[in-house]
Image (spheres, rainbow, N blue to C red):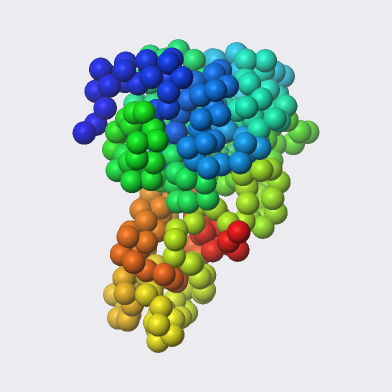
Amino acid sequence: MKARTSDIEEAAGVLRAGGLVALPTETVYGLGANAEDPAAVSRIFQVKGRPPSHPLIVHIGGAEQLDDWVEDVPRAARLLAGHFWPGPLTLVLRRGRRVPLEATGGLETVAVRVPDHPVALALLAAFGGGVTAPSANRFGQVSPTTADDVRAELGDAVDRVLDGGPCAVGVESTIVDVTGELPTILRPGGVVREDLEAVLGHALSVPSSSHVRVPGQHPSHYAPRARVVLVEPEKVVGEAERAGELGHRVGVFLPASCAGAPVKAHAVVAVPGSVAAYARGLYGFLRELDQRGCDLIVASLPAEEGLGLAVANRLRRAAGPRP
Ligand code: TXA
Ligand code: MG
């Protein structure tokens, strides 16, 4: 059931008491703690099984609070915050004294965003402080996009789960580092590169998926249990049948360009033709194929423009070498 005002007040109390609250955002569900409580922040790492060197995002209630959390806000950061907050954009800036090193993995920079979800904003307003929240999944796994996903993923390890319905964007925020001379994209996400470039007035580079720039950006991430194999769209059906003949329980992401094509496989997901719908459904599709017992998923990449850049990035990582 969707969170009510009383649930939100209670959840704010849980945060004040040092507890963990799973909260909906427009991108994915987060596992939240009081950003200024080092013990609560450390519990996030324990529950996720995430190495403590991996920095977290501090969620705040509005752009006007930015200066409370960071130092030296460059013009580009104000511009981007003004245009895209609340929204799926995270800015990396110099850490303010209020942010404990536990939240930044020891870095002198901190990632900050204002989420665009009524329940998240109501929680931030009721709580009054900042909430550090990584995606509410175990380390390396698929991010949750519904409250049920969170419960299945974390169970009793989280003190409260606020239900805000399915996430509207479905992939994580775009992370932009604004500490250098020119802003750079660290992770493609819900705010698309083209829109960032239009606001900034210059081109932005995107790192290749295999290049680990900061802890938490490893090649294998966002991964279902099943192994993921990426092929050209026109080869998906053939590859799925070949793997099936080899004895795999194959799940197929059937590209929209092959919609309706007959395919022999254990489970088939029809990829939506709109890339926004693909992004919204992506993690749910991966979870579904895991739940249906697939051990191999055959998929192809969407065109790497607009939201397709983030979808392709997550699929590449899901297909990346496992530790
Ligand atoms: O959409 C999202 O961003 C979601 C929702 C819950 O807000 N959160 C999320 O958090 O995706 P997480 O912890 O799964 O991913 C945060 C990413 C990590 O990959 C980490 O490397 C990067 O943010 N990050 C955090 N602080 C950083 C910093 N100071 N410098 C560079 N990267 C940083
Ligand atoms: Mg994550």
Query: In this view, which residue lies farthest toward the right?
Result: 181
Q: Residue at x 39, y 28 (%)?
A: 21
> What is the x, y in percent for residue 80?
59, 30
Q: Residue at x 39, y 41 (%)?
A: 154
Viewer-proximal residue among 10 and 114: 10
Drawn side of residue 37 relative to residue 288, left or right: right
Viewer-proximal residue among 22 and 60: 22
Q: Residue at x 72, y 27 (%)?
A: 108
Residue 122 figure quarter: top left
> What is the x, y in percent for residue 99?
62, 20
Residue 304 figure quarter: bottom right
Residue 72 figure quarter: top right
Count every numbered label the image shows and give the total: 0
> What is the x, y in percent for residue 181?
78, 33
77 above or below 216? above
> What is the x, y in percent for residue 230?
52, 70
Which quadrant is the C terminus positioned in? Answer: bottom right
Q: Residue at x 31, y 70 (%)?
A: 267
Q: Is residue 226 at least partly visible in the picture?
A: yes
Q: Is residue 174 at least partly visible in the picture?
A: no
26 above or below 59? below
Report the image quarter containing ligand 1: top right
Which quadrant is the N terminus positioned in? Answer: top left
Drawn side of residue 223 relative to residue 97, left or right: left
